[in-house]
Image (cartoon, rainbow, N blue to C red):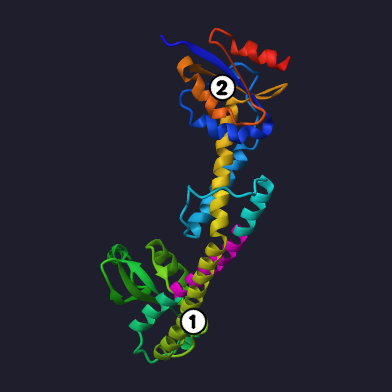
Amino acid sequence: MEETRLVSLTFPEDKLPLMMDRLQSLLSFHMLSASQYAKKGLSDQQDGRVRELVKRVEALIQALHLTPDPDASVMPLTDLDEIENRIRELEGQYALLEQAQQEVFQVVKENEDALNTLHFVNDADYTFDELKECRYVAVTFGRLPQDSVRKLSLFDHSHFAFLIFSEDRQYAWCCYITTKSNQAQVDNLFSALYFEKIEIPYFVHLSPVKSLEMIEEEQSKDKEHLKHIDRKIIELGLSCQQELLLMANQLEKNLALTKFKKYVADSSTGYQIIGYVTKDHLDEVKQCVKEIEGLRMEDYPSQVSAKRLNDAKLA
């Protein structure tokens, strides 16, 4: 059976990141959790905070359609407050663009629905102002799922008229007409059947043919506005791409460091890591850490108690 040695590594606090880099790749050195020989490992209250910042940076990278680069270096900005402030600033810039994008997209969608409806009734000889001003009759445009169209036969049609303009396998584009006195009741019926109301834009007052022209002109402007917002989002991504990728790598490194701290105890002479290594791999450990300034390495027979060794360091 191979002889095993107990190794103690004591080093200055500022060398902790370097120790992590060196020891994590050293498979022959089996580090002990600091809780096995000390009261606890290094306390790190920032673990949850770092995890949350990692999620927020990853969300920004995804939203801006950036490609993570695990090989990129880390950023010099290591203070978590500074990192969080910068993340919040970028989130705010993106949120404004996203909100504008969603608002314009919704207008485009509503106008698209209105255009579809107007195409079906473009030969009508009334204006939409005339429809809106009807004293006794209410006309509602929209679309109804085909399943609901079939269910309509089960209801009393005496309070409304139902007209289909066009249909496909999924929907029927249609309108229903009822009296103002029955409108609430009929609206509730169609709402229960998943009727999707299509609003005719507020600026439409003319006949369907002329209204089509107005909405198409407005639609063209809105689509150009959408393209403009898309370009702004791309520009934002390009302007902060390198910064975000470096920030992501820095936070991942910070997160790895918080996990590594469970192996680190605080002694009177600095930080301490204790672990086991077989005697034939002892030189491998020495070579791995020999260039770290201020580090002291000691090895003992494996029978020596790690806890007693730590207590001696604290004395």
Separation (CA) of disc 1 from disc 2: 64 Å
Query: At 48% from the left edge and 31% from the top edge, which residue is drawn?
Result: 25
> First in sequence: mark 1 or mark 2?
2
As drawn, which residue projects farthest toward the left?
169
What residue span does the magenta drawing correspond to? 91-110
- Between 214 and 285, the residue placed more toward the observer is 285
How far from the left and from the top, in percent, is residue 203?
52, 84
- Depth check, mark 1 against mark 2: the one in front is 2
Image quarter for residue 268? top right
Instruction: Identify the residue under disc 2.
Output: 33
Q: Is residue 15 above or below residue 54?
A: above
Q: Is residue 101 magenta?
A: yes
Instruction: Identify the residue under disc 1.
Output: 221
- Between 195 and 217, the residue placed more toward the observer is 217
Q: Is residue 301 above or below residue 263?
A: above
How far from the left and from the top, in percent, is residue 303?
54, 7
Figure quadrant of the N terminus = top left
How far from the left and from the top, in percent, is residue 274?
58, 20
Q: Is residue 77 left or right of residue 2?
A: right
- Between 234 and 120, the residue placed more toward the observer is 234
- Between 254 and 147, the residue placed more toward the observer is 254
Give the number of marks: 2
- The amino acid type, in three-letter code, at marker 2 is Ser
Q: Is residue 272 left or right of residue 187?
A: right
Q: Is residue 191 above or below residue 162?
A: above
Say if mark 1 contacts mark 2, CB within 8 Å. no
Q: Is residue 56 above or below residue 213?
A: above
- The amino acid type, in three-letter code, at marker 1 is Lys
